[in-house]
Amino acid sequence: MKTKEVTQLLKTLGWHTYTDEVGDKFSLFHLPDRVVDLGYGIRKYGREQQLEADVTASTEAFSCGCKAIDPGHRRYAPLVRRRRGLCYQVPAITEEHVRRASDESIAWAQAQDLDKALRDHAALPTNAPGARPIWHLAALALLGDVAKLKFYQASFEAGDRLGFVNYVTKDYIDRTVSFAERLAARG
């Protein structure tokens, strides 16, 4: 089986597939309260084929929050990552392997405590690296911690970046406060 065939099969199973800016393949599966993201690929491994898949789970609200804070952020933001991805190494990847990867990914995502993951992101330090500052800010907004976000805003206005990585500018903080206030107004 080739990656293109895996993509077609995932579509028939209800996944929405896309390719990122560097050509990696992903599929999203929407459940009522969460979204499952499956990054996948097929490769040769000696005489065998290997289906590798990384799995994450999130919510539409968290992804929208990250996008509101950082308009350049990809359309999906993970709340929870599976520590070890799925890996099937067999003489030939079949439809059954893809179906099993789909089922396992969905079951894993359903078992995740996304509320705890949101609280964990909110508890991250301001000097967290990578995309974590965006996740931290989005989590605070979704949890309704407007007071903490306004403290961040006042600190940035006073010239104290609170240890945030360089790419997090005052505009990021302002957008986060605005996002949190819109959420709070909705009740």
Image (cartoon, rainbow, N blue to C red):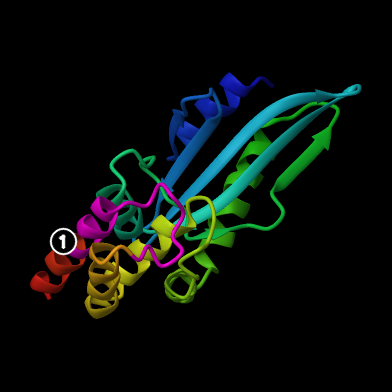
What range of the chain is rendered magenta? Answer: 160-177
Q: Is residue 165 magenta?
A: yes
Quadrant (top left, top right, bottom left, bottom right) of the C terminus: bottom left
What SS does tag 1 mark?
Answer: helix
Q: Position of residue 94 (x, y in %)?
A: 71, 30
Residue 51 versus residue 62 in the image, above or below: above
Q: Which residue is mark 1?
A: 178
Q: Nearer the viewer, residue 182 or 167?
A: 167
Q: Quadrant of residue 175?
A: bottom left
Residue at image point 28% right, 42% down: 71
Q: Position of residue 58 (x, y in %)?
A: 43, 58
Q: Nearer the viewer, residue 35 or 125?
A: 125
Quadrant (top left, top right, bottom left, bottom right) of the N terminus: top right
Q: How many marks?
A: 1
Q: Quadrant of residue 87?
A: top right
Q: Residue furthest left?
A: 185
Q: Is residue 28 magenta?
A: no
Q: Amino acid at mark 1?
A: Ser
Q: Position of residue 55 (x, y in %)?
A: 58, 50
